[in-house]
Amino acid sequence: MIPTRPLEPDDEQWRKLAAITVDHLAAVLRDLPAAPAAVLDATAEVLADPMLRRMPPEHGRPLPELLDTLVRAAQPGLNPSSPGYLAFIPGSGLVSAGLAGLVADVLNRYTGLAAPAPGFVALESDLLRWLADLFGLPPTAGGLFTSGGSLAAFSALVAAREDRLPEDFRRGTLYVTDQAHASVAKAARLAGFPRDAVRVVARDPRHRMDPDALARLVRADRDGGRVPFCVVATAGTTNLGTIDPLPEIAAVCRREELWLHVDGAYGAAFQLTARGRERLRGIEHADSIVLDPHKGFFLPFGTGCLLVRDTAPLQAAHAGDEAHYLQDLAGQELPDFADLGPELTRGFRGIRLWLPLHLHGVAAFRATLDEKLDLAAWAHDELAAEPALTVLGRPELTIVGFRCARSDDRDAATAELLARVDAERRVFLSSTRVDGRFVGRIAILNHRTDRERVAEAVEAIRRHARAL
Ligand SMILES: *Cc1c(COP(=O)(O)O)cnc(C)c1O
């Protein structure tokens, strides 16, 4: 029998559904330390499971069965929630952020504009203010929470373009190194720039942007009739976690009147720690900063953040033309987030960071980030002491790069080393190329990754490196 409001569970049903869901997830979390961080041999089997690939039924099915399906669907591939996940830039997935998502979705308020949900917009706006203060940005600063770093970079580049270039902006150029994240070039392309607008600046032996080379390239481009407008410095590269020299780059930007964008998607959260603050010195000069709470604040995927020194250019670039159907909602002191980014309708995205910060306290985040810095420094020292390995410099943040030292073909040996370590399924490492060379990485950012697990990674890397 179909109830009169088939989509609305009553009080008792809804509590039961929530309890079943939490029980299911709690079991997954209990198994997490023992579960592999990557399952690369189950894809075909899971995708071929007919139970998994059913179309929506005409009448509903029991929740436990659906949860089983979802947990099984989560199995193949990578598991960034795992403490053994030391690949790419690790995720985490704070459970408290999951609860925040539940609250936001059940209360369901519209935060695209301030008037429909002034309380929630105020909480989100206060949180952005707190972040702006963390990075030493002035009172004019603001920003917004996005779906991720890529969208935040896109809005930053559009704001820089609108602020610094004429309407025909196609001669505009921006500056990166070859260590910049691919999302920057993608954002430039989406913002309408030709591919050769992204200029690659030489870097120093520590893989950081060379500010003198930057200044020379900017001047040469100007002499060649181009219009330099923006420098993208990376504060924590995806490859090795290196930080471009922000004070020197800021000085070039000031002299040449260029917009300084800092890509801190991975690294900016370390500003919470004393060591991070020291290493990120100069970030306070940025015109815009990208950070990814779904990396450095351990949130589940889906939360990035853009901070700007001055909200005016961001708003000038994103505010839509007058929309008469919204005329009842104008005139608030609070920001209209729809005027600061591409989205109109959005949920209470900021709660995913707000609730964990208020529930656990800032000190818990600082301590966890400090622990990650300690673990990376320790892993570096352990690997550096191993004659069968070459280590690529002390980590500035939490990524350690390494290569096999002895083989005739070190690229192949390092690839084989990674394959052997990953095959044991206790940790999952990924690789990259730096200066054309194959490099293995330990990337530590998951809040669940502890000393024991990093020690397991180090032990496995040393053991296989010696055997190769
Ligand atoms: C992850 C990352 C990005 C891209 O952010 P998304 O949230 O994946 O869109 C950009 N820059 C750096 C340095 C990153 O590590």
Image (tube, grey):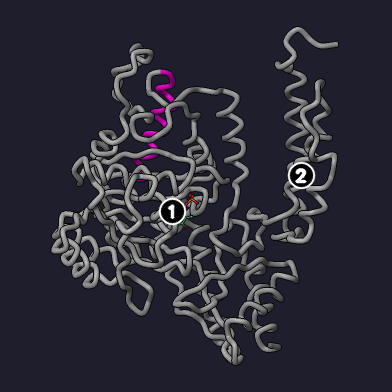
In the rendered structure, does residue 443 fall within the stretch colored magenta? no
The three-letter amino acid code for the residue at tag 1 is: Ser
Query: In this view of the protein, which residue sits in the foreground, 278 or 236?
Result: 236
Q: Is mark 1 within 8 Å of ligand 1?
A: yes
Any part of residue 244 in sight: yes
Please identify the dominant SS of the magenta region.
helix
* Residue bounds of the magenta highlight: 116-131
Residue wearing tag 2: 71
| Residue 240 rendering spot, x and y as whole percentages | 47, 69
Residue 183, label in figure:
1
In the rendered structure, does residue 128 fall within the stretch colored magenta? yes
The N terminus lies in which quarter of the figure?
top right
Left or right of 61 on screen, residue 140: left
Identify the secondary structure beneath mark 1.
helix
Up/down of 197 relative to 406, above or below: above
Any part of residue 364 in sight: no
Left or right of 132 on screen, residue 451: right
What residue is shown at x 55% (from left), y 29% (from top)? Answer: 104
Query: In this view of the protein, which residue sits in the foreground, 213 or 61?
Result: 213
